[in-house]
Amino acid sequence: MKTILITGCSSGFGRDIARYFLDRDWNVVATMRTPRDDVLPRSERLRVEALDVTDPASIRRAVEAAGPIDVLVNNAGIGVLNALEGMSMEGIREVFDTNTFGTMAMTQAVIPQFRQRRAGVIINVTSSVTLKWLPLLSVYTASKAAVNAFTETLALELEAFNVRVALVLPGRAPETRFGENARARMQNGVPEPYVDLAQRIFAQWERSTEFTHSLDVAQAVWRAANDASCPVRLVAGADALALVE
Ligand SMILES: NC(=O)c1ccc[n+]([C@@H]2O[C@H](COP(=O)([O-])OP(=O)(O)OC[C@H]3O[C@@H](n4cnc5c(N)ncnc54)[C@H](OP(=O)(O)O)[C@@H]3O)[C@@H](O)[C@H]2O)c1
């Protein structure tokens, strides 16, 4: 029976990826900043571990506690929508610390076991905003585009050790807590000269009829984990697919 470790399982995609793999008889190590036992269904195949991807000691403890794993999913992430001039450097670093450096640190922590066993898959969740630029998302997009470049280069580096690396690029998923979490990070709001632009973007989102569901993301992660012939980049969700078709 295979084991998958997923970051950011307290809500949204992470929680639903964990459910999807549990339903298909995998062992799941569901990690959360604040572990809770009421997020996922009870199962002998489920372990919930504490993990903050920005904290090296937490990473070390979680990877040790998980033991051997077959698949790592770097899903934990934070968003922010603002003009660059409305953001502090501290806020920008926070986004990169979680989305970019957190992904790199987790990947680095599992590579030795994968390389030694000559088996393993690393799946990084980025975003379809890296396929079509949107204003007011420069920092978030940069943090995810860096992960795309990192992942595609790493795929070449790990190929010789039979370690696969994949990217899942979801579209916009208003059903998760992502937007609400991102809004909490915008305490001072969008600077006045950008308010019209922000309103146009929100109006455009409200008019959109196609978006992404957690199930689309779980299915793409499932494919990346199980299909050795799948491409490095998998786009997930109707809106994201529309961008590439
Ligand atoms: N929803 C969208 O529109 C969308 C679109 C494209 C891509 N994505 C990406 O998909 C991923 C999942 O997002 P989601 O929509 O499921 O949002 P979500 O419901 O906000 O879930 C994000 C998860 O990441 C966790 N997290 C945040 N910082 C963390 C840290 N330092 N260490 C460990 N976990 C941390 C959160 O945990 P806490 O509960 O502790 O905060 C939460 O479990 C993210 O990488 C996001 O960038 C989302």
Image (tube, rainbow, N blue to C red):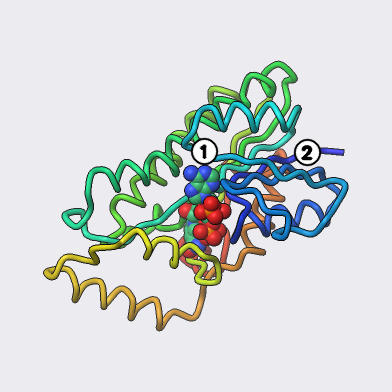
Q: Could you tell me residue 14's position as x and y percent?
A: 62, 54
Q: Position of residue 148 (x, y in %)?
A: 45, 41
Say which of marks 2 and 1 sits in front. Answer: 1
Q: Note whether ligand 1 is within 8 Å of mark 1.
A: yes
Picture residue at 19% right of the left edge, 76% below the top: 196
Q: Position of residue 62 (x, y in %)?
A: 64, 33
Task: Please tell me which residue lies in front, 61 or 136.
Answer: 61
Q: Is residue 132 visible?
A: yes
Mark earlier in primary sequence (2, 1): 2
Q: Which residue is mark 2?
A: 3
What amino acid does circle 1 point to?
A: Val
Q: Is residue 184 above or below residue 34?
A: below
Residue 132 vertical position relative to residue 3 in the rendered view, above or below: below
Give residue 227's quadrant in the image.
Answer: top right
Q: Is residue 169 visible?
A: no
SS at circle 2: strand
Viewer-closest of 20 and 45: 45
Report the residue marked by disc 1: 53
Secondary structure at numbered mark 1: loop
Q: Residue furthest top?
A: 116
Instruction: From the viewer's side, name the closer residue of 7 and 149.
Output: 7
- The disc labelled 2 sits on which kind of residue? Thr
In the image, what residue occupies the spot 79% across and 59% down?
41
